[in-house]
Structures are given as structure tokens and as C-alpha cells.
Image (spheres, rainbow, N blue to C red):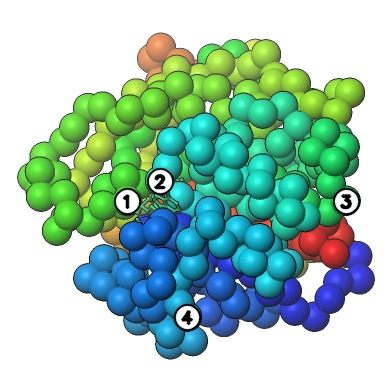
Amino acid sequence: MKIMKNSYKVAIIGATGMVGQRFASLLENHPWYHVVAVAASSRSAGKTYREAVGTRWAMPTQMPAQMAELVVMDATADAEKIASMVDFVFCAVDMKKDEIKALEERYAKLECPVISNNSAHRATPDVPMIVPEINADHARVIEAQRKRLGTKRGFIAVKSNCSLQSYVPAMHPLMEFGITKALACTYQAISGAGKTFETWPEMVDNVIPFIGGEEEKSEQEPLKIWGQLEDGKIIPADGPQITTQCIRVPVSNGHLAAVFVSFDKKPSLEEIKEKWKEYRGEPQKLNLPSAPKQFLNYFEEDNRPQTKLDRELENGMAISIGRLRPDSQYDYKFVCLSHNTLRGAAGGAVLMAELLTAKGYMD
Ligand SMILES: NC(=O)c1ccc[n+]([C@@H]2O[C@H](COP(=O)([O-])OP(=O)(O)OC[C@H]3O[C@@H](n4cnc5c(N)ncnc54)[C@H](OP(=O)(O)O)[C@@H]3O)[C@@H](O)[C@H]2O)c1
């Protein structure tokens, strides 16, 4: 770990939204980061954070008192001021893709690093899309991105989509056995759409078999995560190709996936469980504040993992896996789970920021 400052000032862009609220909760007592500014659209600007969020507060804990009285700034109109106040920003906004791209590049060009939950820049070849336990080394592409943007410290780093945060981690330690094909059906919570049962009553007692754009992201983003850095770009891997179906289910938080895999060199059931148990990534080695101690957790019980019971494991940052067994068409099948707004969104972004801070990118 590089020698770091004791404390970093940060802003949350999109602070009033579902992911923004998660950032607010997670950063309340963070040992390294201190929230000094919150920003959202012009609709919220000028109100206190408490007023702007109003009845939309959807977190299980109270709004952090220190943030409640901050006056919400306009993410676009106040960009220069925000960038001058902070060491970097977390960003999770619901805007058009080209507007998000422009907003994130603007902050980066103002020499303010952007840790993003948005999908707009995920396919940009010199923007790293980091799952800290899997591809921490992709951070090295930031040097090429800084050259392109003409910045000294400003850059954009993105989190991948929440849907894949259970099955990509579960598949990753098994890559050495040569995964030849994989299928994943996801059962995704309504908070993934920024909603609660109050704001989306149609979801009570219902399943909707379509989430716009989700299957494309769920199939393509893993290939970038498993990609290689060449000539200042991340070149996506050729495989393993994963085919997916993504389904919205009546659950508040937690995305579950049913996964089927085949291998070139088929491992035994015990070998697979051993690989999961032993797997450690950079966050565990660096002992980062938000890192789960045990990243991949296998349950022997037939009825686990359960969304409601297991999504909060290790503060919602661990992956739960169960029901590993042989399949008649693929080699094996199993079920896995991750918390979509913690590991899958704000928590994963905080962990990525910690990784980049530890590697010196925020100094
Ligand atoms: N929910 C998840 O599990 C999840 C997971 C991964 C990624 N994401 C991504 O994270 C982003 C936010 O998702 P969410 O679920 O938090 O959405 P959300 O609850 O609808 O919140 C949207 C946020 O964007 C702000 N916003 C809207 N228009 C804006 C503008 N013109 N300028 C500045 N801010 C603006 C809103 O501010 P106002 O309150 O002022 O309107 C609000 O703070 C999306 O890109 C989403 O794809 C979400």
C-alpha cells in the first residue's frame, strides 16, 4: 500500500437517489472518506439533503445527521465548485447516457477523479471497470486515460452492472479449469431499478420477465472484466461466453442467480468448493476497510442462499453460493447471491475507491 493521506474529502453526485442514499449511509463513519458535498439535479439543488430526499429515504438506518443539513448542489451548474472542494466524487445518476458521459468527463477534466456506478463509460476502452477482487490490475489503464483526457489526476473508473456481481465472482476462481460455456438466470430486486414497493406497487405479488438492457450488460461486461491491458486499452476476453435471462422479482434487495457451467478440464465438486473457500483478492490482501474477510461463502444447506437471510453477509459485501451439484446438460449447476445496492452498487464502488486510494491514484 502507498503512503496515503489520513483523510479524503468526497462528494456524492446523485446523492438523493437509491444508490446515492447507500453511499451516504456507507460513508457516514468511513475511516478514510468524509462527505463534504452532495449534488443532484436542479430539482433538488438549494434544498437541504433532508428536504430534497424527503419521503424517498429508503435505507434501514437513519439519514446521517451531518449530511442531512448539507445544501444539495447542482451536479452540472456547480461542477467547478464541487471539484474544487473535494479529492474525488462518487457518481450515480439517472440521466441520458451521453449526458452522463459528458458530466463524468467534465469532473475528470476538472482534475477530480470519478468513481462511477453508471453504465455510460463501461465500454470505453481506457476506463477500467473493476471488481476489486478480480481485476484490480486494470487500474493501470488510468495512465492512458489521463493522457487522452489531458489530466494529471482526473480520471473515471466504473463499477460493473449489479446483475453479474454474484456469478462472475463465483466463476472467476474456476477459470483455470477452462469454462467452455455458462448460463445464468438472474432474479433481481426492485431496488436495482431505484424503486421500493411503495413507489412500484405493480411489483407486489408479481414477476416481470424483462429488464431493459440488462441481458446485454450481463453477457458483455464479464468479458471486459476478464480482459487484458494492451496498448493503453482493455481488450475484452473472447470467453467464456455467458448466456443470460434477467428477471425482476418481488424482493426489496438482493440479486440471486441460477448458474450452469461446463468445463474443459472438469473439476470435482470438492475441488470447486475448495477454490471458492481459498480465493483471496487484492482487497483481502490489502485489508481494505470495506473488504469482506471471506469473499466467496459456500452454504451446504439445500435451501441456501436465501435473498432475505443472506444478502447482508459481511455488510452486504460477500458473495453467497449454494446448491452446487451435477447437471444433465452442463457439468454443474449452482445458485449464488449478492446484495445489489451494496456489493452491486455503492459498496462495490466504495471498495473500488479504497483500492485506487491504496494504490495512490487519489493523491
Ligand atoms: N439501484 C441499483 O442497484 C444500481 C446498481 C448499479 C448501478 N446503478 C446505476 O446508478 C445510477 C443511479 O441509480 P439509482 O437506482 O440510484 O437511481 P434513482 O434512485 O432514480 O436516482 C437518480 C439520481 O440521479 C439524479 N439525477 C437525475 N437527473 C439528474 C440531472 N440532470 N443532474 C444531476 N442529477 C440527476 C437524481 O436527482 P434528483 O433527486 O434531483 O432527481 C437522483 O439523485 C443509474 O445510472 C443506475 O443505472 C444502480
| Residue identifier under label 2 | 94
- Residue at (41%, 12%) from the top-left corner? 329
Q: Distance between the residues labelled 1 and 4?
A: 22 Å
Residue at the image point whose x is 70% and y is 19% from the top:
237
What residue would you read off at disc 3? 152
Q: Mark 2 to mark 3: distance in Å?
A: 28 Å
For label 1, being within 8 Å of ligand 1 is answered yes
Across and down, in percent, residue 113 comes to: 72, 54
Q: In this view, does 232 lie above or below 51?
A: above
Q: Which residue is drawn at 31% across and 45% down?
A: 193
Disc assigned to residue 194: 1
Is the residue under label 2 in contact with that under label 1 (CB below 8 Å)? yes
Say if residue 168 shows up in the picture: no
Within 8 Å of ligand 1, the CB of disc 4?
no
- The residue positioned 62% from the left and 66% from the top of the image is 82
Which numbered disc, 1 or 2, marks the residue closer to the eye? 2
Per the image, label 2 sits on a secondary structure element best described as: loop
- The C terminus is located in which quarter? bottom right
Q: In the rendered structure, which disc, 1 or 4, sits on the residue that comes first in sequence?
A: 4
| Tag nearer the camera, 3 or 1 | 3
SS type, badge 4: loop
Q: Could you tell me the amino acid type at mark 1? A: Gly
Quarter of the rendering containing residue 283: bottom right
Q: Which residue type carries mark 4? A: Leu
Q: Nearer the viewer, residue 182 or 304?
A: 182
- Residue 339 image offset from top left, x and y in percent: 42, 54
Residue at mark 2: C-beta within 8 A of ligand 1: yes
Cβ atoms at labels 2 and 3 below 8 Å apart: no
Q: Is residue 115 left or right of residue 254?
A: right
Write down the residue under mark 4.
Answer: 70
